[in-house]
Structure formats: C-alpha cells, structure tokens
Image (cartoon, rainbow, N blue to C red):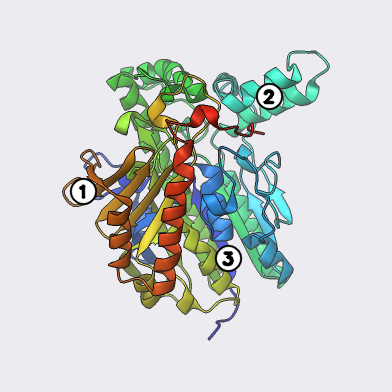
Amino acid sequence: MRERRLNIVVLVVDSLRAQSLDQADAQRPRTPFLDNLSGASVAFQRAYATECWTLPAHLSMFTGLLPSEHGAHFQTMTYARRTPPIAEILAASGYHTELVTRNFVFDGTILGVTRGFQAESRPLAPLSRASLIGLFLAFAKPRVRRHIRTTGFFHPRHSDQRAFVRSFARSLMPADDLALGHVLEVMARCRRAQRPYFVFCNLYDVHAPYPPAARSLLEPWDSVRHAAENLAFPAHFAKLGQHAYLRSGFSLSPWGREVLRNRYHRAIALMDDKLAAFHAAARADSLLDDTLLIVTSDHGEAFGEHGLYLHDASVYDTHLHVPLWIQSPSLTPAAVEDVVSTKELFGVMLAAAGQLPTTGTILNAAHRAAHPYAVAEHFFYPHRADMAARYRQNLLAVIIGDQKFVVTCDGVDRYDRIRDRDELRPAAATIEDMIRAVRGSGAVARAIDATVTHVREWANSHRTLGVRRVDQVALPAVA
C-alpha cells in the first residue's frame, strides 16, 4: 500500500564520518542535536556510502545505482545515463525540486549532475579579508589549477575566470546557516503555494578546510594554541592539494594531522548548532508535520588513517561508514543495526512521493533482511602521474555483517570488523570466499544473483585497470 505524498528534505553534511560521532570516543566533538536526533528518528548505525567522494556518492543517492552503474566517477566525471535521477522523477510528478549548496560539484560544469532540479541556489558568505585565505586554498585545488592552465586566467580580459576563482574562494568560507535559512524559506513558500517540494541541500562547512569558526577560516586569536594553528593550517592544507597525499613517501607531521582534526571536530560542533537551529525553526512553523527529513553524509574523511587524507583512494570505513537519520510523522524512532547502503535512499524518497511502497525500502525490517549487505566501489583518480602504485587501482568492497571483503588488483582481502575495527589486519581470501559469504547472508535469491554477477564481472574487468595494466588503459580526461 502506498502512503500519502510527503515533502522531502535531504540534508547531506559533506565529509561527516560516523567515526567522529562515536559515543565511545572521548575526543569526539560536542553534538547534542545529533545525539538527540538519534532518539527521535530512525537512526541507522551501519550505513555505508557507495564511494569515498562527493560526485559518485551523490549520484548513487540520486539514482539508486552503484558508481559502476551510473558512471559518474573520477574516470568519466559525467552522468550520461538515460535513467532519470530522483529530482527528474519528482519534478515530473508535480514537486518543486531545488538544490541548495555552494559545492562546485553541483555548479553545472559536470554534465548531468543537477538533472531534474528546477532551481539551484548557491548561498555564499560575503567577501572579507579572510576570503584571501580561501583564495590561497583554492589554488591548491587541482580543478582550479587546471582551469587556470586551460583558460589563461591571468590575462586581463579574463574577467569570467577571475570571478570563478573569487567565487571558489568564497565557497570555502562558512555559510551553511545561510543555506539552511534558504531551505526554510523554500519550505514555507511551497507550503503557502500548496505545492509538494523536494529540497536537496549539500552542507559544506564540515568539508575541508574545516572552518572552525562561524564566520571565518581561522580560530579566534585567543590562545597560543589557536594562534599556532591559525599560522600553520594553510601550509598543512595546501600540502594536501593536487592529490599530493597519493604520492609515494608523502607524510604529514603528527601535529599537522592534529591541527586538521581539531579544525574538523570544531566544524562538526558548529554544524550541530546550525542543524539544531534549522530543526527548531522548522518545527516551530510546523514545516516538518508533512515532511520526510533525511540527514546523512556522502562520505567520511581521513586524517592519516591508512596513510590517507581528505577523501580519496579508499573503501575503508573511515570513508564509507556515514551517519544516517530519517524522520517523518509516520515513522517510529528506532536504532537500526542492520547494514544498509546510502544508495537505498533513492527508494526511500520514491516511497515518500507515493511511487513505491515503504515496505520496499530500508525503512522496512523485512526488506533489510532480504538485502543484508552493502556494496561500495572506488574508481581511482587517473591524473596524478606520480601516484603510488597501490592507489592506481579500482576497488570493490562488500560489507556483510561483521565481515568486509575488498577486491583489489592483487586479490581479495577480508576484514573482521569485530577483531579488527580499524581495518589494519586483512586476511587473504578469494572471490569464491566472498561469494559464499553473499550466498550465506540470508539475502533473497534475486539480490544474491545480482551481487554474485556484479562481483564476477568486476573481478574480470575493473580489476585489470589496476597496478598491472594501468599504463595500457586510455582514460578520459576530467572535465
């Protein structure tokens, strides 16, 4: 039975890893709102992204497909399938669809990413002296550097290109309170117009460079420690630019890692305050009475774990394990321990729009039991010539209960998530070991067959893009 149509609001806190919200971690940031949300929603304790960075992870939410199926990842940088994404489906059924973010993945230069969104809003912080730091950090981004090289940015007639870099610098400045304020305005306006709405908001203030203050990229100059961190962080962050952390021999000092992690945790605490203010305002105006609210992340973040930084080259839990809360008037709050994939949010949104029974989504225990594992992939970044060989390969992961299998170009690793929570001691396994685990998971036959087919096809095709044969593969350039 299909339920009445709900409005849909999705808040994706970019780069928020579940690990940093672990109640057992004494150094975790202060997040009273998110802690309370866990008791007031369906809180998924074991949700996994399908990729370790923004573009493919979002397209999986938009389409319900894995990166290898929707095709939008580092080696293509476009969404070209005919399959309509969620915004296109909802727009066709009468919803107002709007995308709110200052993330440049959604600025229209990557084809197909914003299909179906009738409006796109980009709240930016006003220019200030601190924006100069943002400009400095912008130049550390590979995309900005490529843009400058291909357009001759410094030519005096290239005003459009100068505007691009200025806006990129402004996009690094904290402004998610403006984004959430705009979401509230859209919700109120659509309610007055009696029109259902789908608002998808990518929140950027937890993303690198992890703004540690409400209106600045700098900590307050109120202590020796904060002053030292303010002076050090631009150099530490710039060192990570152009995927430099993928080079052999790259390292960042323990203090540099601590500086970045401290900023990250402060950014999370500030985000918690912003989400609390948004939720309180929405409740005060009864805007959540007929609305499905999803709060999640697209991927996690690394601060030296496994030698990695930011979000790249990984199917480790530090990047894949993300928080997920779903709240609506008809849902009974619960903590869900089952493994789920964020690509399943596509079905949840369809159900909220009355186009799929809720029983066919992760909100239903029987559905979760029939689909008890998550599949994730990584397509490596091909444009760093001096990348270490271990990063120059595509990866496939299957999370089944307390086991994780990872297919690399050299074989299959198996991780025990109970005895080896940090994924430091993989055991050798085979494709057949993985398939036996899938078959023994209790999943329905159709899901098993699809996963087994996918694993075998991956082993026979994508693995060959790895260390052994990468020089033989012609890869498309990033747009």
Secondary structure type for disc 1: loop
Q: Which residue is mark 3?
A: 8
**Callout 1–callout 2 Cβ contact below 8 Å:** no
Specify whether 115 is left or right of 137: right
Residue located farthest toward the top when viewing the structure as drawn:
155
| Residue 159 in sight here | yes
What type is the residue that disc 2 sits on? Answer: His
Residue at 48% from the left image edge and 63% from the top image edge: 344
Secondary structure type for disc 3: strand
- For the residue pair 184 and 434, the one nearer the viewer reads as 434
- For the residue pair 469 and 450, the one nearer the viewer reads as 469
Mark identifier at residue 308: none
Q: Which residue is mark 1?
A: 24
Question: Which quadrant holds the C terminus?
Answer: top right
Mark identifier at residue 147: 2
Mark in front: 1 vs 2: 2
Residue at 66% from the left image edge and 58% from the top image edge: 186
Residue located farthest toward the bottom when viewing the structure as drawn:
1
Whole-percent x, y for residue 224 in the image: 32, 17
Residue located farthest toward the right when viewing the structure as drawn:
157
Pointer 1: residues within 10 angstroms few (<14), some, or many (20+)?
Answer: few
Whole-percent x, y for residue 230 in the image: 42, 20
